[in-house]
Image (cartoon, rainbow, N blue to C red):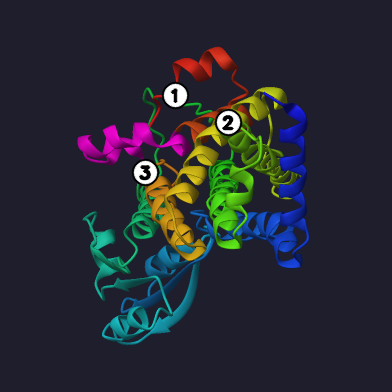
Amino acid sequence: MSWPRIRELVRKEFIQLLRDKRNRVILFAAPIIQMLVFGYVVNYDIRNIRVAVVDYSHTMESRKLIDAFEGSHIFSITHFLNDERKFEDLLLRGQVDMGIKIAPDFAAIIRRGQTAPVQIVADGSMSNMAALRMAYTTSVLDQFNRGMLRELYPQHMSYGRIDARIRTWYNPNIESQHFFVPGIVAFVIMLISLLLTSIAIIREKEAGTMEQIIVTPLKSYEFILGKTIPYIILSLLQLTVVIIVAIYWFEIPLAGSIPLLFFAACLFLLGTLGIGLFISTISKTQQQAMMTTFFFILPFFMLSGFVFPIANMPDVVQWLTYLNPLRYFLVILRGIFLKGVGLDVLFSGLNIS
């Protein structure tokens, strides 16, 4: 193996990449922009649930129920309606997320010590968001029921209780950004490395320089190394940038070892760069290479556990996820970022779904 020949090929590759101003934007600005966009967009935290209310009761009890929703700082009463039929129009237009109907006999039923029904209509077009809204609604109703019981039965009752002291480790505030941002780091690096390497060899074919390279003393493995090393260096530089953005912009804690993180990234890049070079080899044009790359990116994203838990997938699909390098790198990134685990824990826990 001749390292001088590999060095010159690496230098040529860098010159070809950096002499085009558009490539410079893709190489350095695109990862930061994607990181910022995905970091804010991919978020399941619910902070404002818009609610429309139809109060046919107009009593102290119904007012207390409405105040219970407004006092939660999650629900926002945006519409007070006189007709429940307007719920559908507001939900269709996306102006509210939920509707609450309080019956005329709401207070009378409660004063008799009976269970008073309250109708709640929610927008279920986004099932996961609707489930979270219903969970928050149930919590508010439970607090309201306990408060009404204390008012109706003020006598002191002593009984044994369970004192649950709940602690959430690794993500104390249960912020979805702490879960998603490390995954976005992996996705951005995979996207850039696949796109760049998928056109590395095909560019030589289209420029007509492949024949010139073939007649040189350059060996095949030296050619592959010369084509791979520049993208490894660029991908590690981009990884450094997006990690800095994750830590200092999104304030994601990095509890683990930075050298271990970069070592795992190098192993991950061997897989993505290998796939990119394979695409570049079998493609005849750059357009074909780009289309083939996106054919790989979507299954990698969907089968990685980035958004959808692998345990919820069919068994056959779960077996297919073992072929996905992004699946393993997500486990590694989240383990190093949030848990601070070492190589021994990562090696034994890479089957986490």
Assess whether residue 318 is covered by the magenta stretch. Answer: yes
Task: Please give the name of the residue rendered at 26% of the width and 76% of the height, measured from the top-left corner.
Answer: 104
Residue span colored magenta: 309-327
Marks 1 and 2, how far apart in space? Answer: 31 Å
Task: Please give the name of the residue rendered at 51% of the width and 62% of the height, measured from the top-left corner.
Answer: 286
Task: Please give the name of the residue rendered at 46% of the width and 43% of the height, measured from the top-left corner.
Answer: 278
Q: Which residue is mark 2?
A: 221
Dividing the picture into quadrants, the one containing residue 28 is: bottom right
- Which residue type does callout 3 highlight? Leu
Q: Which residue is mark 1?
A: 350
Position above or below: 67 against 330: below
Q: Which residue is mark 3?
A: 303
Q: Main secondary structure of the magenta part?
A: helix
Expressed as whole percent of the image width and height from the top left, the position of residue 301 reads 43, 48
- Which residue type does callout 2 highlight? Tyr
Say which of marks 2 and 3 sits in front.
2
Q: What kind of element bears circle 2?
A: helix
Assess whether residue 185 is covered by the magenta stretch. Answer: no
Dividing the picture into quadrants, the one containing residue 343 is: top right
Dividing the picture into quadrants, the one containing residue 97 is: bottom left
Left/right of residue 52 with respect to residue 45 in the rendered view? left
Expressed as whole percent of the image width and height from the top left, the position of residue 50 reads 46, 71
Marks 3 and 1, how far apart in space? Answer: 15 Å
Expressed as whole percent of the image width and height from the top left, the position of residue 143 reads 42, 49
**Image disc number at residue 37:** none
Residue 69 visible, this angle: yes
